Amino acid sequence: MSGRVGESSSRRRRTAAKPPRYDRSITVFSPEGRVFQVDYARNSVKLEGITSVAVRGADSVCVITQRTKAPADPLLDTADPAFMHLFQITERLGMLATGMPADGRALAQQARNEAAGFRHKWGYEMPPKMLAQWLGDRAQVRTQHAGMRPYRVVATVVGIDEEKGTPELFTCDPAGQVLGHKATSVGLKDQEAIEFLEEAMAGNSSLSFQETMEMAVSALRHVLEDNSQGHDTEVGVVRKNYPIFRTVLRRIYKNPLAGQSILDGEGQ
């Protein structure tokens, strides 16, 4: 009997000493004030293994991202939208979803519906800032209910504000935090790219269209591995004097040929 009592009390002590799991529910804060499921969602954006860069110039915005690495199955069509990260939300608005492709597509479709409803109701294009705030509200709600999980993407919204006539760049993370940027990076090597942008843009934040594109490509190239076959990327641009969001696929190289422009002779 005494042996059973001792075993039972020992089991209770081990149970009492085991710390609570604050990451089992998204609605529970840890003693440090963190919501671990949101932290996990933010960190898992890097698991896709790609890096995205966005730069805002004086009259344009450029976003560039690596394409999802081709799967081992040779029968899959890699040109299918399932492998895309850039989405045209409206004629003037674009969204780059860095992270889980399925979450990115779902979020883009919801954004298209919201932007279309806004235009139908108010008669003008939804401003980039308002779309970013709407995405942030959607993401924040998913941190309050146990029956949901956060989106595993960071959404980058770019466009031209129809009223102000200025280019705008915003990001929205899984926690619903919306931030405006002059330039930013998201993904696997985001800190390296941000450090490059901070140094390259110091005292020169008013970039022309050509300089904006070159800055974005240079920042991404800075963090890419050296690969003789190059890296497939998606590029999205929107300009003040031509406020249509356009995308193109390009192949860029870590080290371009001597004398070759950063944008010439590379890709499609």
Image (spheres, rainbow, N blue to C red):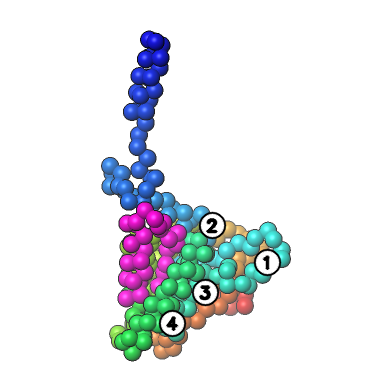
Between the C-alphas of marks 3 and 4, the distance is 17 Å
**Mark 1 vs mark 3: in front:** 1
Q: Earlier in the sequence, mark 3 or mark 4?
A: 4
Image mark for residue 235: 3
Q: Farthest residue toward the front? A: 1
Q: Secondary structure at mark 2?
A: loop
The residue lying at 32 percent from left, 76 percent from top is 130
Dividing the picture into quadrants, the one containing residue 79 is bottom right
Residue 178, position as x, y percentages in the image: 33, 66
The magenta region covers: 130-157
Residue 9, position as x, y percentages in the image: 35, 19
Report if the CB atoms under discs 1 and 2 are less than 8 Å apart: no
Q: Secondary structure at mark 4?
A: loop
Residue named by callout 4? 90
Q: Earlier in the sequence, mark 1 or mark 2?
A: 2
Q: Earlier in the sequence, mark 4 or mark 1?
A: 1
Image mark for residue 76: 1
Residue named by callout 2? 49
The residue lying at 31 percent from left, 87 percent from top is 122
Q: Earlier in the sequence, mark 3 or mark 2?
A: 2
